[in-house]
Image (spheres, rainbow, N blue to C red):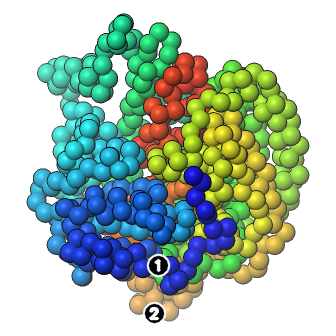
Amino acid sequence: MQPSVPSGPAVPSETQPNVVQELRDRFGEGILAQQTTSDEIPTAWVAPTSLRGILQYLKTRPDGAFQTLYDLTAIDERTRTHRDGQPASTFTVVYHLLSYTLNQDVRLKVPLLGETPLVPSIVGIWPSANWYEREVWDLFGITFEGHPHLRRLIMPPTWQGHPLRKDHPARATEMGPFQLPEEKALVEQEALRFRPEDWGMTPHGESSDYIFLNVGPQHPGTHGVLRIALQLDGEEIVDAIPDIGYHHRGAEKMGERQSWHTYIPYTDRVDYLGGVMNNFPYLLAVEKLAGIEVPDRAKVIRIMMSELFRLASHLVWYGTFAQDVGALSPVFYMFSDRERIFEIVEAVCGGRMHPNWFRIGGVAQDLPNGWDRLVREFIRYLPRRLDEYDRMVMRNSIFKARTVGIGSYTLADALEWGVTGPGLRACGLEWDFRKQRPYGGYDQFEFEIPTAKRGDCYDRALVRVEEMRQSLRIIEQCLNNMPPGPYKSDHPLATPPLKERTMHDIETLITHFLGVSWGPVIPPGEAACGVEATKGNNTYYLISDGSTIPYRVRIRTPSFPHLQMLPLISRGYGIPDLLAILGSIDYVLADVDR
C-alpha cells in the first residue's frame, strides 16, 4: 500500500511525536539514554538485547511506521573525548530509520564493549541490512550474530585488519612499501578462485547443472569497476551477485585525517559525475555543527551549480543507458551537450568535473562577469535537444521493447531496500528532499516532482528525463532572481579576517594563519544532512570531537542500496536484460565503494 506522504516541508520537530519517549514507555530499560544532536534527529541509545524488538516495532508502528532502513554504520569510540551523557562503549553501531508517512527520522545507537563486539543481525527485519552489516564487519570488525553471509564486502578477502578502526593506518606511508613475494602471490591468486558456495549459490539444480558466468570486473558497460557473478539456468538468470570494492579509496577514512576545509575536494570524487553536488551535504552538516548561516546569494549560487551538475550527470546516464541497450548515436550527442555545461562550470569555477568550489559558509568566489549570458544561452538551447532525444530514445520502439516491464519493483520493495531518488519516484511516491525537506534555499523555488507507476527500467528513465526539464526551470529562476550580497558567510569559522587587517596586529595575523592552514575548530557534536543528489539521497553524517579534523565521516550514498537490490530485480531475466537493468539504476561505483 502506498504511504501517505506530506506534500509540504518537514514537520517541525516540536510538533512531531516524541518517538524516544514512546520507546521509553514501551521498552523501559531497553532504552539506555537519549542524546541531543546538532541535527535534532531523535536519538536513543538502546540495549543490544532490545534492539531487534525496538526496530521491529518502529518498522510496523501503527501511528507512523519507519519503513526504511536509511543507513547503518558504526563508530570507533576509543579515542573520542567529548561524550557527555552517552553510555560507555568501545564501539557504537548506528541505525538511521526514515518514515515517509511522518516525514521524520530516528537514530538508534547500540553501545558495544570489548575488541570483538557482537550485535544481533537485523537482516530478517530489513533485507537491505545485509550489505550494511557486512560493511561494518569488514571495516570495524563488529560481528552481527545471525547474518546469513558475513564476509568481506569492500576490502579484498585476504585483507588483514579492519580499516575504519582508529588503530588502523590512515596513510600508505604508515604501512610500509607494498611487497608481493611468491608465497603471497599464490595466496592472492587462490583467493580469486570462484567457488559458488562462497557466494551462497549452489552448483546444481533439480535436473541440471547451473552455468556460472563472470560479468567483469571491467569498466565499460558497468559504470565503474564492477564484477557480477551470474548463476544461469540456460540463458535465464537464477541469481546475480554483485562483487564490489574495486573502486574503494577509503573516502571515509581520509575524512579522519583531513581538516574540515581540506576534505571538500575529496567529496567531489565520490559520485564523480555529480561535481559540487557532493560538496553540498558535507558542507550543510559542517555548517549545522558550527551554527553558520549561509547568505542568500551563496544559497542561490549553490542551487544553480547543483542543478547544472544534475543535468550533466543525467546526460551521461541518458546517453550511456541508450548505448547499453544498443543505440550508439545518443551518447555522442549528449556528451556534446554536457560539454556546454562544463563550459559554464569552467567559466564560474575554473574546474570542470571536480571543481571543488563550495566552501564552508558559501562558495569560493563570486560569479564572474558574463555568467548570466552563458546560462541564458544554455537554458534556451537544451529544451529543444531534450525534445529531440525524446524522439530518438524514449519513443523508440526498440528502446521500449528492451525496457518496458523489465527490472520492475514495487513501492513496497523500494521502501524495504532503501531506494531513493528517481528509482523511488518511478514507483509512484512523490518524494523529493528538495520539496519534503527543503535545504539550502530550495523552498524559494517552483518546480514539479516527476513520478511514474510501474517502477521498471522505462519508468526510471522517464522520471530522470523529466527531472532534467525541472532542473532547467530551477536554473532559470536562479538566473532571473540572483540576489545581491556576499557570496560567503562572515562567520569566523567560515572566513578568516580580511587580509588588510592582518597587517595591524599579531593576533589577527595568527587567527588568519590558523584559519587558512589548520582550518576551523568545529564544536563537538553530531549532524547528518542529506540532499537530493543526482542518483538519490546522499547524506553525510559527521561527528566532531572539537578538533580541526572530523572524528567520523560517514557517507550514505544512494548507489550502495540501489546496487544491492540487483539480484532481486534480475532473477528470471536474460543477460541482455541485465545490461538494461544496470543502466536504468544509474549508479557509479565510486558512489558505491567510497
Q: Residue at coordinates 47% horizontally, 9% vertically from top-left?
A: 234
The reply, left or right, for residue 400 in relation to residue 192 is: right
Q: Residues within 10 Å of mark 2 (few under 14, many from 20)?
A: few
Give the labeled residue for mark 1. Answer: 17
Residue at 45% across, 62% down: 66
Nearest to the eye among marks 1 and 2: give it.
Answer: 1
Give SS at disc 1.
loop
Front one among 205 and 460: 205
Q: Position of residue 35 (x, y in %)?
A: 32, 78
Q: Residue furthest top?
A: 208
Residue 40 at least partly seen = yes
**1 or 2: tag closer to the N-terminus:** 1
Location of residue 222 with respect to 514 vertically, above or below = above
**Amino acid carrying mark 1 in the image:** Pro
Graded by Cα atoms within 10 Å as few (under 14), some (14 to 19) or many (20 or more), the crowding at tag 1 reads few
Between 248 and 372, the residue placed more toward the observer is 248
The residue that appears at 51% across and 22% down in the rendered structure is: 572
Query: Which residue occupies the foreground of this view, 97 or 163?
Result: 97
Q: Which mark is residue 505?
A: 2
